[in-house]
Amino acid sequence: MLARGPSENDLQTLWGAGVLPPYAPILYPGASFSAGDLPAEAQQELKEYLIDHPDVLVDPPPELAALIAALPTNVRTDIYVEQRMEQLRREGLLTGPNPGGSYEEWIRNTVEKGVSADTVIAIARDHEIGPDDFEVLTGLQEITDPDGKSFFMLNTDMSGDAARAAVLMTYILNAGTDYENGDFESTPYSSAEVQRIIDRQEANGWSYGDDVGFVHGNGGRLVTTPNGMLMGAGGNELQDLYGQQGGTAWGDIFMIGKDDIPDPAAYLENNLIRSGTSDVHPDLDLDRLLHHEERHSQQWAREGYAWFILQYLWDAHKFEEDAGLADGGY
Ligand SMILES: [Zn+2]
């Protein structure tokens, strides 16, 4: 065997006997190894080898790709995260080792949600997203909903610009809103959707420039949401425009309508985010309610502040229909 080199049969025998190193599939790309044969330590060893040699992960031979795909989910996800970072490095969009933190969480979310590498590269390139951009989320309380999506509680001394950046980065980080079975088709996570949110934030800039400080100054609290807007509770109400439905979308801020909440931060965390439902409609998925409210934010952006208020008062139904009646609890 040594004289002629190992045959396919030899390799299978050695692999099955546990004699070959876990990275044998890289050394012998023509041979087909089964991940099912690998004991847990060898799976870890293979994973560590690949993470230390991420260049192997860009355009891997099909046998290696199949082997990785057959590994247990938690092991292969770690490998795919590193693979995706290596693809970003090759595009000049990331330098150095895995930066960890929210950047790694972003890449992991895109892997777990089946977002394509092309989409991730497009977002990073078009919007110049790098590890530094996620720093605005550092130090904020992260709260996850029943699907595992992340919301971030704004600190009450945050500037409007920081709040705006935190909202956008929360959309990017989550890599999807989980909106489904609602009044509309869901919009795929994309670079174009990031741009749409940036443009809407600019049109509703007064939400960040004025109202974030106003809400905080009056004892209210605000969280960023996966669909790229703010949700708030408590304090003095901004204005009771859609009060009977339990909340008011005021530009980019959805203020829930309940009065006299002693601890608005705890209310947002427990009654909305962790429950994953509307506080006034317990059967209504929060993902759907937020989709409805974000469409109101789009209406504010499209019509402009004063004109939107006038038109809404004139024909509320038209705007509620446009935002999705069932999604809004109608
Ligand atoms: Zn509505």
Image (tube, helix red, strand yellow):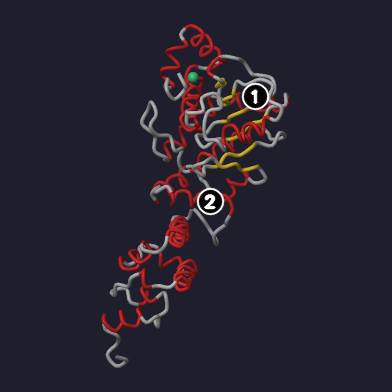
- Look at the picture and state if 96 lies above or below 131: below
- Residue 275 image-quadrant placement: top right
Q: CA distance from mark 1 to mark 2?
A: 30 Å
Neighbours of disc 2 within 10 Å: few (<14), some (14-19), many (20+): some
Query: Which residue has dot 1 on it?
Result: 211
- The x and y percentages for residue 41 are 48, 73
* Quarter the N terminus occupies: bottom left
In which quadrant will I find the C terminus? top left
Report which quarter residue 327 is drawn in: top left
The amino acid on which the numbered mark 2 sits, given as a three-letter code, is: Glu
Which callout, 1 or 2, points at the residue further toward the start of the chain?
2
Position of residue 221 in the picture relative to residue 5 (left or right): right
In the image shown, does 289 or 164 lie closer to the viewer? 289
Determine which of the numbered discs, if any, sits on residue 105 in the image: 2
Residue at horizontal 36%, vertical 77%?
27
Q: Could you tell me which residue is drawn at 39 percent across and 62 percent down?
A: 58
Q: Is residue 42 above or below residue 309?
A: below
Q: Residue at x 42, y 13 (%)?
A: 318
Residue lying at the far front of the rendered structure: 282
In the image, 185 versus 126, the foreground residue is 185
Mark in the foreground, 1 or 2? 2
Amino acid type for the residue under numbered disc 1: Asp
